[in-house]
Image (cartoon, helix red, strand yellow):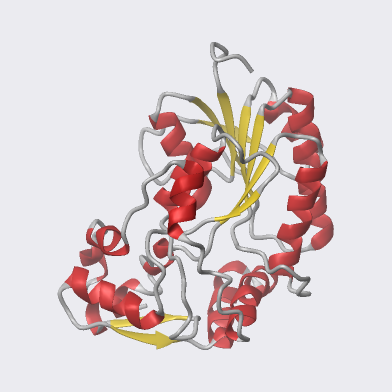
Amino acid sequence: MSEDQPKRYLVTGANGFQGGAVARLLSGRGHEVRGLVRDTDRPADDEGRAWTPVRGDLGSAEDLRRAFESVTHAVVTLPLVYEADSVLAYARNIAEAAREAGVSRLVYNVNTPLPEGRTGRAGFETRRLAEQVLFDSGLPTVSVRPPVYLDNLFSPWNGPALVNDGVLAYPLPVGQRVAWMSHADLAQVLAAATEAEGVVGRAVDVGGADVLTGTELAAAFANALGREVRYLPLGVEDFEAGLGQLLGAESAAGVAGIYHHVAAGDQDLLAAEPATTERVFGVQLTSTVEWIKTQNWDIWSGRTA
């Protein structure tokens, strides 16, 4: 597309945490942004949103054709669905609609790194399947593979224990090195991927500014919060059971499968090199301590998980 042609973005999952962060960032920069959502009546996380909600289902080719009309750039995040046939249909529908619209760049947020070999775990393999469909589509595609999100810790499941008890519980081994990344930094990377040179056709592992073990992450929280914090490795089975109450058994199993794989000994999967992320996409990442200090942890004071 020419430099003078206006950019029109479609962001899928715009009512979710990751898609929402991208939609806010792009619209805040003055771009025209459509956010694909299942329910346009669902309230957004922030008032006065500048992006336009468009109702649609990834399983409907017709919905996606309408959503992609006149779109020049797309950022795709899939829902927490791990049934292979459904994900295959989503990816094919997205690819077909984007091709028909003449999309100049499609960025796929894989939502996880992918091990080199097949794992048999739906949390990885359905995302690998969608990635391959998009790469094979002929669209100018960039695949972004982030690790674990810092925002997972600013939640009703972690916030109260952190603030009230100084306990950071998470389903990763204490010695696991993780490039914890915020949704805001991921949004920066995804937005940059819609324009960056030399990335089309590539799958790029990305991460946050610091690669930390559980002990080091707890120390960062202690530094930022001014209190003692200890890391407690949570059993993946317990994590999956709790997640199942929120998401349902299938989605919980898909997410938990990633943690089962890591717990089995994949030491480097979540440890993307920060310098690579900054160099490839031209972004400046936020340090873990800085991110912690900008969150309103007081809202969890006195509450229970």
**Position of 17 relative to 33 (above/below):** below
Horizontal arrangement in the rendering, residue 28 relative to residue 252 (left or right): left
Q: Nearer the viewer, residue 98 or 251?
A: 98
Q: Quadrant of residue 94?
A: top right
Coordinates of residue 241 in the picture (x, y in percent): 58, 82
- Where residue 181 appears, x then y in whole percent? 43, 60
Of 98 and 178, the residue lying toward us: 178
- For the N terminus, the quadrant is top right
Is residue 211 left or right of 42 when viewed as pictured? left
> Is residue 175 something one can see in this rendering?
yes
- Residue depicted at x 50% and y 38%: 191
| Quadrant (top left/top right/bottom left/bottom right) for the C terminus | bottom left
State the residue lying farthest toward the top: 4
Res 304 visible: no
Give the quarter of the image for residue 36.
top right
The total of numbered circles placed on residues is 0
Compared to residue 256, the image places residue 88 above or below, namely: above
Horizontally, residue 58 falls left or right of residue 50, namely: right
Compared with 171, 74 (above or below) is above
Q: Nearer the viewer, residue 143 or 130?
A: 143
Residue at x-position 24% and y-position 60%: 296
The residue that appears at 52% across and 43% down in the rendered structure is 190
Residue nearer the viewer, 278 or 111? 278
Residue drawn at x 70%, y 71% as measured from the top left: 250
Position of 203 relative to 222 (above/below)? above
Q: Position of residue 201 (x, y in %)?
A: 70, 42
Q: Residue 269 placed where, x, y %?
A: 58, 71
